[in-house]
Image (spheres, grey):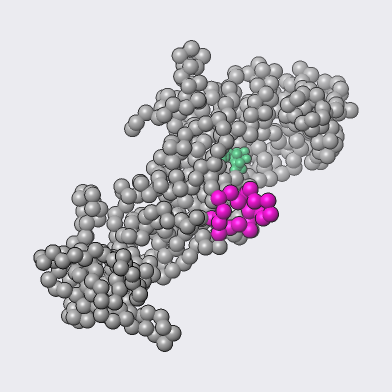
Amino acid sequence: PAPAPKNFIREIIDEDLRSGKHTTIVTRFPPEPNGYLHLGHAKSICLNFGLARDYGGSCHLRFDDTNPLKEEEEYVESIKADVRWLGFDWGEHLYYASNYFEQLYEHAVKLIKLDKAYVDSLSAEEIREHRGTLTQPGRNSPYRERGIEENLDLFARMRAGEFPDGAHVLRAKIDMKSANVVMRDPTLWRIRHAEHHRTGNKWCIYPMYDYTHCISDSIEGVTHSLCTLEFENNRELYDWVLDTLGLFHSRQYEFARLNMTYVVVSKRKLIQLVKEGYVRGWDDPRMPTLTGIRRRGYTPESIRMFIERIGLARSENVVEIEQLEACVREHLNDTAPRMMGVVKPLKVTIENYPEGQVEWFEFQNHPEKPEMGTRQVPFSRTLYIERDDFKEDAHRKWFRLAPGKEVRLRYAYYVTCKEVVKDASGEITELICTYDPQTRGGWSQDGRKVKGTLHWLSAAHAVPAEVRLYDRLFSVPNPLADKDKEFLELINPNALEIVHGFVEPALGQAEPGYRCQFERIGYFCCDPDSRPGKPVYNRTVGLKDTWAK
Ligand code: ATP
Ligand code: MG
Ligand code: MG
């Protein structure tokens, strides 16, 4: 593969290796197991695992599981599956912040002994109020000058379960007047009588993110700890904890989070869509979760390509979803076999074709890739074509089927439309056509021009399929920016259209996850809802960018 493009993180690493600061690098991907991974996480995964791969270092998968109320084993398993699916492997480097609770506790005791931490007995509300604001300095808590012995005793009793939730917290003793609000005596531990998915009821106090993260990085020897820009202000605290405790110093660097048009990439918002029933679940193909877009038919290659193309920067921006769609289109154009599926069928009878006769035509699976082989496709007197390929009142530039017009049925014959059959309501129910037996294979010796080429299926052989036509999740590019409407009101009501079409016989047997192109329509993926003989296909993306703006 081509060498990865340079970015500011790679420049920092190059310099650290050149100067001898590090001889190898260790990165980590630290998800909190409180939801499914989304495309934003893919950026972090590709970055961290990609650096470890390219520099011959290692990347740890660490579950940042310090909040027992929101975390579940289901999420741990889904995260592992998603990282593997993206094509990355943590090897033996699987860690849990909850494995460090004892060490984190010991370090807190040490901070108390250094007079760098104290037990505060203000309520959460009072602590917030004492913290001040960006423009107003904070005030010291009346409990700030408790003696070291009293703090040690209270902290031990917090751990022992003597106090209810919220009675006390352990805070760092830094500076209530710091210009950086994060540094105004941040909370390090809080009481929470809740069962943890890994440690059970062993703990009733839990460490806070900022405190846990830097020490976890340090314990694991992480050299470059990469996080998104909203943690820029937290870096001072990250450094303070490691410096004060004299621990191995990992370095935090921030990069711009992924923001995209027409979706939301925030776990909190995605949880809301799932819990409130706006989508069918985390793996709903409309969702920007990895499990959702996988079900929709996206390939891991296309996502890695996308993340590489958007690059890595230090300033916030919004990536257009078209870029993601272009990547999957490009990868599937290369790899997906061409098949025939009729999404909105219209019956065609070839009146001069012998009743009961079946011919088999050889189709290439990929026009540019003979190595992908060929297959046999049946042709008979009654066919389905795409309803949109017929127009009763056609203009001059219409090259598809119309009354009196001749078109090519791909690889088969030329046919001409003779008659339009309608029902009582005026809806077209069938076309009566004739075929020219001299055009077998889809060309004629006399060289007459037929511009339109349609896909088709033999009605007797076609397999009925439910086809789910997916579109963008939101109707506006930035659903979170609307001042008058909540993002939930901006969900695209047409993001899923279910139609009943037909597919080639071979596609009736496909395994869930099978991807192909329905010629002339788009890329599709077989859905796990499929049953034998009753396939369900999801539209991954259309062939062209036809989104009406
Ligand atoms: P969200 O903000 O969606 O709730 P999170 O940051 O709380 O996600 P974590 O599980 O803590 O989710 O994230 C794990 C890692 O993924 C973190 O290092 C975080 O910086 C990174 N990450 C999360 N969202 C994005 C994003 N949109 N772009 C890039 N990296 C992200
Ligand atoms: Mg987080
Ligand atoms: Mg977050």
The quadrant of the rendered image in which ligand 3 is seen is top right
Which contiguous range is marked in magenta?
473-492
Residue 305: x percent and y percent? 41, 40
Q: Quadrant of the N terminus?
A: top left
Q: Position of residue 468 (x, y in %)?
A: 45, 63
x, y percent for residue 467: 42, 65
Q: Nearer the viewer, residue 242 or 517?
A: 517
Q: Say whether residue 357 is left or right of residue 73.
A: left
Depth check: give the residue in front, 475 or 163. Answer: 475
Q: Residue at x 83, y 39 (%)?
A: 125
Q: Would residue 475 be visible to someone looking at this image? A: yes
Dominant secondary structure of the magenta stretch? loop
Point out the residue furthest to the top here.
19
Which one is nearer the viewer's eye here, 116 or 127?
Answer: 127
Query: Where 218 falls versus 20 (above or below)?
Result: below
* Residue 183 against residue 518 in the figure, above or below: above
Q: Residue furthest front?
A: 396
Q: Is residue 484 magenta?
A: yes
Q: Is residue 314 magenta?
A: no
Residue at 75%, 29% in the rendered image: 181
Q: Which quadrant of the figure has residue 212?
A: top right
Q: Residue furthest bottom?
A: 424
Image position of 117 with respect to 129: above or below: above
224 in relation to 501, above or below: above
